[in-house]
Image (spheres, helix red, strand yellow):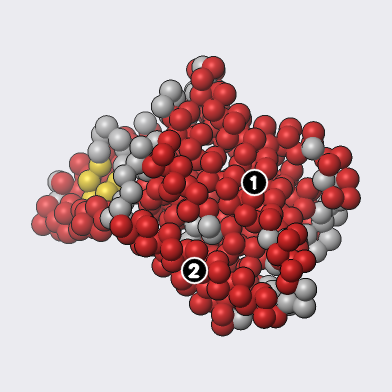
Amino acid sequence: PLARAILANHIIWLQRFPAHFAPFRRIMWVSAKSGWLYDRPMDDFTTSFGRAELLALASSVLFAGTLVCLRQGMKSGTPLSAVLMINSVVSAGGMIGALYKGTLWNLTAAPFLWFVAMGLVGPGIGSISRMVAVVRMGLSPSTLVASSTPIWAVLLAVSVLGEALSAKVVLGTFCIVGGVSLMVFEREKSGPNFKNWFRTALVFPIMSSIAYAVAPIFTKLAYGHQLTPMLGLGIAFGVGNVLLLAAKPLLPGGGRIHSPRASTAWFFLGGIFNLSAAICFMTALTIGNVSSILPASRITPLWVLLFSSIFLRRLERVTLLLCLAAALAVAGGVMITVR
């Protein structure tokens, strides 16, 4: 309310000087109902690539920052330590946000159960599979395999939520599959033991991709009862940590928790990035469809390859074929996203 009042007063002040501020008056306006600040000359752009998709795109950039921090932290820390730290940061941030917004005490049973289910498959199963994949396959290849998430998400969105499926969505899905296949070919050509890699390491990013496709479906079902994205984050990521700790004896090496000071700092920073990405993504789901939001959020491979080439040259070998695979996966995501 305070931000809306400040923006509204600012527009009123501009209107008193029409000769000097006509360009600004044309560009900016404030919606008293929604509180959004729009750029009117970009109306055509936001019609074809709306606010929900822009939030999802921002989420992809922020999540790439998370992955870079994780790769640095896991030089001496363990994957389980990384996941627990990130989930804790996101859960705490979500609860604080829900408390600030006043939605913490208004929760009902139905959305609570859906948010719990979201936490089991996303921050729980999805997170641990993703972290193990980064260690066993490398940051860029595992991210490319995980880019198959839109395939499952689109199918689930159509079958469960009744969202429309267009020809562009189908073509974009094939582009994503092509990018993943190209990456697998590159790994087969360079890897000394592809069969063993295929049977072991590849299962983790695939499992992660399916889990992350199911999670937003549960989120949308929860939103059917209550639009509480921050509370959803607090519950889901807290449940994810409970699941990880319960499954700790079943994890490879007993789920060793080890995080030196430097790794803890990297994991915490990754948690901040992930919290920001999750807020963007959960907010996007309140105003858009899973079939367009999730692909836009999966343009992460482009940013990961960029950040890897800049910051992780000693840790990742970014080849031309990997870049081509990333471009194909990104093209598929854009094709699905643009209306």
Which residue position holds label 2? 178
**Where does residue 295 sit, x and y in percent of width and height?**
44, 55
Q: Position of residue 326 (x, y in %)?
A: 52, 70
Decide if residue 277 is on the left or right side of residue 172: right
The residue under the point 77% across, 66% down is 196
Tell me: residue 298, above or below residue 164.
Answer: below
- Quick one: quadrant of the N terminus? top left
- Label 1 sits on a secondary structure element that is helix
In this rendering, the answer to whether 82 lies above or below 115 is below
| Dot 2 amino acid type | Gly
Task: Return the x and y of residue 124 as percentages of the image width and height.
Answer: 68, 40
What element does badge 2 sit on?
helix
Q: Residue at x 48, y 28 (%)?
A: 222
In the foreground, 15 or 149: 149
Q: Is residue 69 above or below residue 229?
A: below
Q: Which callout, 2 or 1, points to the residue nearer the camera?
A: 2
Residue of label 1: 126
Quarter of the image for residue 226 reads top left
Q: Residue 209: give its label.
A: none
Look at 73% across and 35% down and name the residue there: 243
Circle 2 packing at 10 Å, graded few (<14), some (14-19), many (20+), is: some
Residue at image position (46%, 30%) is 221
Q: Is residue 321 left or right of residue 226?
A: right
Q: Amino acid at mark 1?
A: Gly
